[in-house]
Image (tube, rainbow, N blue to C red):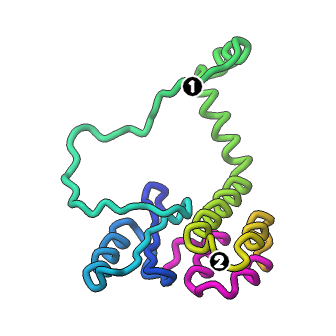
């Protein structure tokens, strides 16, 4: 999966309509809205679990130079940190990039787990914040107890329940 492509899911009330790229979900959204103007359509970002608004306006082609993906930002360090960075091969920027990459690799599993739980919780709040057992289900979610979470959300609508578990498991981009 390309990290630059935003993955979304479309719900009509508690029913999952489609999951996929923004283009796929936008097309399904427009079709669903045309066939049922009173539909309770909601779109969620599968990376964050948060509700998003779609921009359904036609997009003109972009002009100008493409972005190179490099951004300059301010970093505040103590003088001894700057001294150490300056003495590193390639200078401060190269040393910082190496340190960040090393930290990303070291913490990748924990970060991925935290992002999955946060996404599942974000979706759960939006779609089932007033549902029976919500508080207990939240506790099970943050404890990483999938079995208890599944048991607590069993009475919830099937597609909502499936989406929460997909997000928890890291399988959020699967379509129904």
Q: Which residues are magenta?
A: 148-176
Residue 93 shows which numbered tag?
A: 1
Q: Residues within 10 Å of mark 2 (few under 14, many from 20)?
A: some
Q: Is residue 175 left or right of residue 90?
A: left
Q: Secondary structure at mark 2?
A: loop
Q: Nearer the viewer, residue 72 or 145?
A: 145
Image-quadrant location for residue 70: top left
| Camera-nearest label, 2 or 1 | 2
Give the prevailing secondary structure in the magenta stretch. Answer: helix
Q: Secondary structure at mark 1?
A: helix
Q: Nearer the viewer, residue 58 or 42?
A: 42
Q: Nearer the viewer, residue 45 or 101?
A: 45
Sequence-wise, the earlier of marks 2 and 1 is: 1
Q: Position of residue 129 (x, y in %)?
A: 62, 70
Q: Nearer the viewer, residue 87 or 115?
A: 115
Q: Position of residue 115 (x, y in %)?
A: 64, 58
Image-quadrant location for residue 64: top left
Q: Position of residue 135 (x, y in %)?
A: 74, 69
Q: Is residue 84 left or right of residue 90?
A: right
Image-quadrant location for residue 95: top right
Q: Position of residue 80 (x, y in %)?
A: 73, 13
Residue under pointer 2: 131
**Identity of the residue drawn at 63% across and 73% down:** 130
Q: Is residue 117 magenta?
A: no
Q: Is residue 34 left or right of residue 142?
A: left
**Identity of the residue drawn at 68% across and 63% down:** 117
Q: CA distance from mark 2 to mark 1?
A: 49 Å
**Identity of the residue drawn at 70% across and 73% down:** 134
């Amino acid at each position: 999966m390309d990290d630059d492509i935003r993955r979304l899911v479309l719900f009509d009330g508690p029913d999952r309509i489609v999951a996929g790229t923004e283009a796929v979900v936008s097309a399904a959204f427009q079709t669903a809205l045309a066939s049922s103007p009173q539909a309770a359509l909601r779109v969620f970002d599968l990376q964050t679990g948060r509700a998003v608004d779609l921009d359904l306006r036609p997009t003109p082609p972009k002009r100008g130079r493409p972005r190179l993906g490099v951004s300059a930002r301010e970093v505040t360090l103590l003088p001894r940190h700057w001294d150490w960075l300056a003495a590193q091969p390639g200078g401060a920027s190269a040393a910082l990039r190496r340190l960040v990459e090393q930290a990303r690799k070291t913490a990748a599993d924990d970060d991925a787990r935290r992002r999955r739980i946060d996404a599942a919780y974000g979706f759960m709040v939006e779609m089932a914040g007033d549902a029976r057992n919500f508080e207990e289900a939240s506790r099970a979610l943050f404890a990483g107890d999938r079995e208890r979470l599944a048991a607590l959300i069993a009475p919830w609508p099937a597609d909502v329940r499936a989406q929460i578990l997909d997000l928890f498991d890291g399988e959020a981009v699967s379509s129904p």
